C-alpha cells in the first residue's frame, strides 16, 4: 500500500503535550528524545528522514515493522511531544527520536510540519500531514513516497 500522508490535523492531546525540556531529558525513558530543527537534521546528514506523529496509525504501522538493523542512517522525527506513548511503542525498535521544537516551530502541528518540510527541502512546501519520508540526493533532501 502506498501512502503519502496520514492526517492533516492532529487531535488535541493535552494542554502541554509533554513539551517541557525537563520531561524530555528526565532519563525516565528507554528512548533518547532530542528537540530539533530542520537545520539540526540537515547537519546530522543521515541518508533518510522519517517524519511521523505518535497519533497517526500509518506512522505507527510503518515504525512497528522496522527492525533494529533497518534503522541505520535514518533520522526519526516526531511532530509531537508524546514521549510516553513513543517510548512504550518503539522502545524495542528505536534508540533516538528527534522532536520538532515547539520553541522554533510553535505548537500547531500542521504549520510545524509545513515549516520543517520547507526548510528541509530548501523551498516552500505544502506538506502538512504525516507520515513523510525524505531521502538525501546529493547535497539536498527530496520527498520520497512513504510505503506502509
Image (cartoon, rainbow, N blue to C red):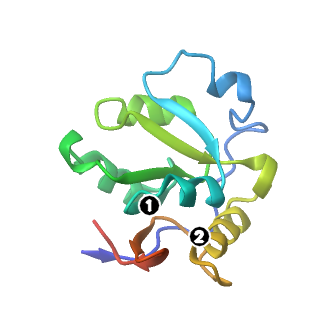
According to the image, label 1 marks what residue?
Answer: 49
Question: Are the residues at dot 2 and dot 1 in contact (C-beta closer than 8 Å)?
Answer: yes
138 or 65, which lies in front? 138
Estimate how packed mark 2 is, as few (under 14), some (14 to 19) or many (20 or more) residues with alpha carbons within 10 Å. Answer: many
The numbered mark at residue 120 is: 2
Q: Is residue 15 visible to the viewer in this orientation of the structure?
A: yes
For the residue labelled by badge 2, is the local secondary structure a helix, a strand or a loop? helix
12 or 45, which lies in front? 45
Q: Is residue 82 visible to the viewer in this orientation of the structure?
A: no
* Quadrant in which the C terminus is drawn: bottom left
For the residue labelled by badge 1, is the local secondary structure a helix, a strand or a loop? strand
Estimate how packed mark 1 is, as few (under 14), some (14 to 19) or many (20 or more) residues with alpha carbons within 10 Å. Answer: many
Q: Residue at x 60, y 71 (%)?
A: 117
Q: Residue at x 37, y 62 (%)?
A: 47
The reply, left or right, for residue 24 in relation to residue 98 is: right
The reply, left or right, for residue 8 in relation to residue 136 is: right
**Percent of width and height locating residue 104:** 78, 53
Amino acid at each position: 500500500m502506498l501512502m503519502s500522508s496520514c492526517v492533516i490535523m492532529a487531535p488535541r492531546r493535552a494542554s502541554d503535550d509533554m513539551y517541557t525540556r525537563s520531561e524530555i531529558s528526565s532519563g525516565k525513558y528507554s528512548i533518547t528524545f532530542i528537540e530539533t530543527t530542520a537545520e539540526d537534521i540537515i547537519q546530522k546528514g543521515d541518508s533518510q528522514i522519517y517524519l511521523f506523529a505518535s497519533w497517526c496509525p500509518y506512522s505507527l504501522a510503518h515504525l512497528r515493522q522496522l527492525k533494529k538493523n533497518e534503522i541505520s542512517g535514518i533520522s526519526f522525527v516526531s511532530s509531537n511531544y508524546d514521549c510516553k506513548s513513543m517510548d512504550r511503542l518503539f522502545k524495542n525498535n528505536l534508540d533516538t527520536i528527534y522532536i520538532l521544537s515547539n520553541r522554533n516551530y510553535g505548537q500547531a502541528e500542521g504549520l510545524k510540519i509545513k515549516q520543517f518540510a520547507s526548510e528541509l527541502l530548501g523551498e516552500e512546501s505544502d506538506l502538512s500531514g504525516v507520515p513523510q519520508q525524505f531521502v538525501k540526493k546529493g547535497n539536498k533532501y527530496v520527498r520520497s513516497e512513504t510505503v506502509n
